[in-house]
Amino acid sequence: MSLLIVFILTAVISSYAATPKQCFDNTFHFGVGSSALQTEGAWNLSGKGESIWDRYSHDNQDLVFDHTNADVATDSYHKYKDDIRNIKKLGVTFYRFSIAWSRILPTGLIDEINEDGIKHYHAVIDELLKEGIKPMVTMYHWDLPQSLQELGGWTNPIIADYFVDYARVLLQNFGGKVNTWVTFNEPYSFCHDGYGGLYAPGTRSSGRHDYLCGHNVLRAHGMAFRMYEKEFSHLKASVSITLNMSWLEPATTSVDDQAAAERARQFSFGWFGHPILSKDGDYPPAMREAINRNSRIQGFNHSRLPTFTPEEVAMIKKSYHFVGLNHYTTFLVRLILAGICKVSKRSGIIDTKPSYENDVGAILRQSPTWPKTNSSWLKVVPWGFRKALNWIKNTYNNPRLFITENGVSYEAGLQDVKRVNYIEAYLRSVHDAIYKDGCNVFGYTYWSLMDNYEWMRGYSERFGLFEVDYKSSNLTRSARLSAAFYSTVARTKCIPDNFNYNFNNDTNN
Ligand code: GBH
């Protein structure tokens, strides 16, 4: 009996020793991320204009889960030095954060530049550079100046010109110090959830406003990228866009569900990925066909999906130096023939209401066996990450990818073993995608540096490596166990096999 135990132990130990440690190349970057609205606070200080999230959270308290707003958030507008000290402690090499359009241009337009806003971001960037941390700056992380929303926001084509004006102001002022730029964070989310659903501005026009938004965001991105090439290429910066992709796995092996899953991928990542990354450009054919057909049946004279001119297709195609990817979770996809039905008065046949969901013709759910987190939409499915990376590799000829967000929310508490396990499992999946499958991934960003304002979920969901004590008057930040774990990864570029659960946990304010 005891011999047997010794034998098993030896086998287990030697199998551990035989597994090579998973390490990333020395050139692989590790960092952490955040966004302006979710952290800065100071929503109306020093000349900042109102954004759509300021307006929406003030006017619709009942829609925000804990009835909060981002007026103060983590007060990073004032506490950015503390934040940067924490980033420094992690030993990561870059910080991804966003600039608030309405802090630079309070009305959204360039006739009025807020010098205090410019000064503020210079101070943040200088502090990062002083500490040897590279800034990666997102130009737009959902916080549109409210005055532009009054013109229809992203549904009005003129906004693309205004965005280019804003992007130019950023490059003129910060281009000498920042060499990695992301034009947009997750257009899928702010167009579909924002214009098609309940996120700000909350127009709830699925299958119409969200497509208009996506169209103008693609134009704005392409135009900003070409403006960079023409006016700022001497800076030798990298300009990218961040797209999100949940892995979409067919719910069954049936041909219908396989096709529905691929169509759902084309409608989500492909909506923005195909125009920018594919050889032919323009919208994915599957998306064009479904929306044109449904629009016709529904009695529209024009497709609800707008059309690019050939010049626009060419301008948008290949408008990137690398692609940013946000990935969190996986869904199972099943075909639906008709979602919300009505009988068409014109044709008499069963018809669907105009909506994105009915255009996709698929229904998404998650397996009850997948581990839960503190976000209803986020289940722990590490293998989905590897599949998503491989799908992008195979669909778009292996573009250079930078993971701009990956992370998880759990309940408050510093002993966040579950978050450590999530990061470890997802990183192993990324490692397999790179070293076994040849995916071209060159960086990883944990979301988020610290707990912050989670949009419609207020402060109730916590994604941070650092915990924020919202009850303390100085919004104390404290390192979680996961901060220690991630710090080990960032410093050694290896996923530790035997993680030593110790970290210097002095808090600072
Ligand atoms: C990212 O979006 C954002 O870029 C980041 O700002 C955010 O903090 C982070 O995720 C964590 O949430 O409420 O069921 O309708 C991730 C994509 C899109 C996922 C909106 C949640 C709403 C799901 N998100 N979605 S639901």
Image (cartoon, rainbow, N blue to C red):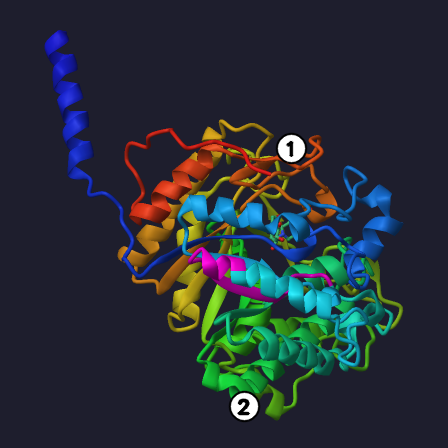
Is residue 138 one of those drawn in magenta?
yes
Residue that protrudes farthest toward the top in the picture: 1
Where is residue 79 drawn, in percent x and y? 63, 47
Q: Nearer the viewer, residue 398 or 236?
A: 236
Looking at the rendered structure, the kind of residue marked 1 is: Asp
Q: Are marks 1 and 2 in contact (CB under 8 Å)?
A: no
Q: Residue at x 51, y 40 (%)?
A: 465
The quarter of the rendered structure image containing the C terminus is top right
Q: Between marks 1 and 2, how big is the CA–CA gap?
A: 46 Å
| Residue at which label 1 appears | 469
Q: Residue at x 47, y 68 (%)?
A: 323
Q: Nearer the viewer, residue 418 or 357?
A: 418
Where is residue 184 drawn, in percent x and y? 61, 67
Residue 262 shows in the view: no
Q: Earlier in the sequence, mark 1 or mark 2?
A: 2
Is residue 112 one of those drawn in magenta?
no
| Residue at which label 2 appears | 230
The part of the image, by quadrant, that contains residue 211 is bottom right
Choose mark 1 or mark 2, whichever is in front. Answer: 1
Where is residue 177 drawn, in percent x and y? 50, 71
Residue that protrudes farthest toward the bottom in the picture: 311
Crowding near the residue tagged with mark 1, few <14, some 14–19, many ≥20 C-alpha atoms within 10 Å: some
Q: Residue at x 59, y 66 (%)?
A: 122
Where is residue 163 drawn, in percent x and y? 69, 77
The part of the image, by quadrant, that contains residue 82 is top right
Q: Is residue 413 left or right of residue 381?
A: right
Q: In this picture, which residue range is highlighted in magenta?
A: 127-143
Residue 223 shows in the view: yes
Q: Which mark is residue 477?
A: none
The quarter of the rendered structure image containing the N terminus is top left
- For the residue labelled by badge 1, is the local secondary structure a helix, a strand or a loop? loop
